[in-house]
Amino acid sequence: MNQPRMTSVRKKKIKTVLSMMNKQGKRLLPVTPPLVEMMDLVTTDDELDYLLRMGTGLYSYQQAAKIANMNDEQFQSFFDTMKRKGLVHIQYNAGGKEEYRLNAVVVGWYEIMMYYNMGKPQEKIFSEKWDEYFKFFKKFNFFPIRNVQNTVMRHVLKPTQRTALMNPEIIDKSKRKTIPINMALSPSGAKVYPAFHVNDIIEKFGDLNEIFVAPCICRHGKTLSESSCNFDMPKESCLGFGKTVKAWADMGYARNISKEEAIEILKEVRDKGAVHSVLHEKDDISLPVLAICNCCWDCCALLKPYNMGATTLSYNATYAARIKQDANCKECGTCAKYCPTAAMTLKDSQVSLNSEKCIGCGQCAYQCKQNNIELYPDERTVYLPMLKKSEARINT
């Protein structure tokens, strides 16, 4: 692709397209210079002009073709590239027919564009610009701007993802450790669990044969711009569900797997320290589940910027952790190492838990060899203010 020269007119078009993309989901990504440069790197003028005509509406294929001013053969090739780049999102109506709209920036365009870029000359630059995007916000991490941001974002930022666990009732045939959970008992003696577990998602979409696995683009991006994953996660770990993800698989970005394979992937990444972040269509937790991001805190595009001291963070949590009263701590620091938000800390041979920072991922309880930590049901929204630079765990 011949790279068009960045003119003031082209920059304005890119900013307008990105602003429209921000209206396609609940997750807001401010339009900053690095984001504009990312879009500039991978789009042609014809593509930008088409997206501006498309706007934020929903189109059938015939309607999408009508606004292109191309013959059928030209449009088919042009539109196929737009879908492969993630600029156009594919969804399905009640009758199972494909419909199309401008994609959101995230989750949507960025992830698909990372898959599209793999092996192409612009791959590394595109990924580095994504890192620059978060470093841009880190520049504003100083007093009193940081305090103002934290106060404002507490009221503005809404959680667009939630943490979930594997169902504690499921017997782990591999004999791996199960997480201790302190549950209230019903009169019948049966344990009462929150209704939301990753196993429920796997069962539902496994029965429909609509589970797909794809390479983790967060981890892939880190290997391009920095180094390998510190937690040695497998390359394929992102699980997607439903017909929309099937369309991505048809493009070669993911592959269909069984629910048994999905459970084994979840067990492996859980063992290595992954947080199960459940993502929904349009980043709206009231809409159907789209994917489970299984990522560690030093790679994850959700958790890494927070740990850099670049952004605030908000999660919907189902569980919370607590240290047992009869804990026999060996001060090994494992819980602190795996905690994605530094809610667990080890200082002066003393482990402590900041419950306000706990997102209920279960990693501290799962990794503790002495079983000193337990989880309990607690559905809530966790808001994490921007860290001070001195508190940041990642310095890049």
Image (cartoon, rainbow, N blue to C red):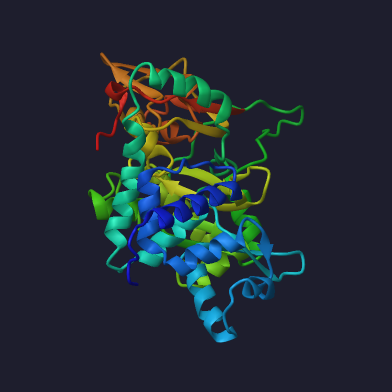
The one nearer the camera, 360 or 112, is: 112
- Residue plotted at (53% across, 61% down): 260
Residue 377 in the image, given as x and y percentages of width and height: 60, 29
Vertical side of 226 occupied by 336: above or below: above
Residue 294 in the image, given as x and y percentages of width and height: 45, 48
Vertical side of 246 occupied by 142: above or below: above
Is residue 137 visible in the rendered structure shown here?
A: yes
Residue 103 in the image, given as x and y percentages of width and height: 55, 57
Vertical side of 142 occupied by 269: above or below: below
Q: Could you tell me how many numbered marks the image carries? A: 0
- Can you name the residue that lies furthest to the front here? 8
The one nearer the camera, 388 or 100, is: 100
The one nearer the camera, 226 or 84, is: 84
Q: Is residue 266 left or right of residue 230?
A: right
Instruction: Classify the position of the N terminus by image quarter.
Output: bottom left
- Residue plotted at (41% across, 49% down): 269
Instruction: Classify the position of the C terminus by image quarter.
Output: top left
- Residue plotted at (43% across, 45% down): 270
Vertical side of 303 occupied by 90: above or below: below
Q: Is residue 73 left or right of residue 295?
A: right
Residue 385, quarter of picture: top left
- Can you name the residue that lies furthest to the left here? 227
Is residue 323 visible in the rendered structure shown here?
A: no
Residue 75 in the image, given as x and y percentages of width and height: 55, 79
